[in-house]
Image: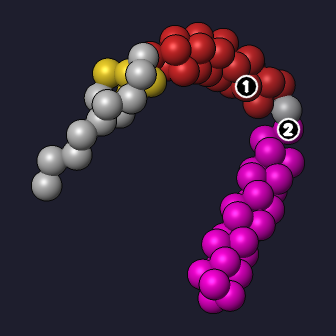
């Protein structure tokens, strides 16, 4: 099945202006995030990430079972 992607300022399904904005911001923020995590306590970071995963998993299950 072939989809026709006739979206302005796009190359197929890739929006060029969004791509040009997203890539530099992501590159800079990834470096800042990596440096920040290196300066934090390892155990605390692992626990916070674990809590984050539990929250996201609970939201997924709730949305799956309720809707």
Numbered disc in front, either 1 or 2: 1
What secondary structure predominates along the stretch shown in magenta? helix
Q: Closest to the observer: 58 or 13?
A: 13
Judging from the image, what secondary structure is the residue with disc 2 in?
loop
- The tag on residue 50 is none
Residue 28: quadrant of the picture: top right
Count neighbours of disc 2 (C-alpha within 10 A) and say few if under 14, some if 14 to 19, many if 20 or more: few
What residue lies at 65% left-to-right and 15% top-to-bottom? Answer: 25
Q: State which region is magenta.
A: 41-67
Q: Closest to the observer: 3 or 40?
A: 3
Is residue 64 part of the magenta span, yes or no?
yes
Q: Indicate left or right for 52 with 9 as reference.
A: right
- The tag on residue 33 is 1
Q: Residue 7, how many percent across, how many down?
A: 39, 29
Asked if residue 42 can be seen in this view, the reply is: yes
Question: From the viewer's perspective, is residue 51 above or below residue 10?
Answer: below
Residue 55: quadrant of the picture: bottom right
Asked if residue 23 can be seen in this view, the reply is: no
Judging from the image, what secondary structure is the residue with disc 1 in?
helix
Residue position for label 2: 41
Residue 66: quadrant of the picture: bottom right
Mark 1 touching mark 2, by CB under 8 A?
no
Q: Indicate left or right for 26 with 52 as reference.
A: left
What residue lies at 69% left-to-right and 19% top-to-bottom? Answer: 29
Q: Closest to the observer: 61 or 20?
A: 20
Mark 2 or mark 1, which is nearer the start of the sequence? Answer: 1
């Amino acid at each position: 099945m072939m989809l026709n992607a006739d979206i302005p300022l796009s190359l197929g399904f890739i929006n060029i202006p969004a791509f040009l904005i997203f890539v530099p911001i992501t590159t800079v923020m990834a470096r800042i995030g990596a440096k920040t995590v290196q300066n934090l306590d390892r155990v605390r970071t692992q626990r916070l990430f674990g809590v984050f995963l539990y929250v996201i998993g609970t939201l997924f299950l709730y949305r799956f079972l309720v809707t």
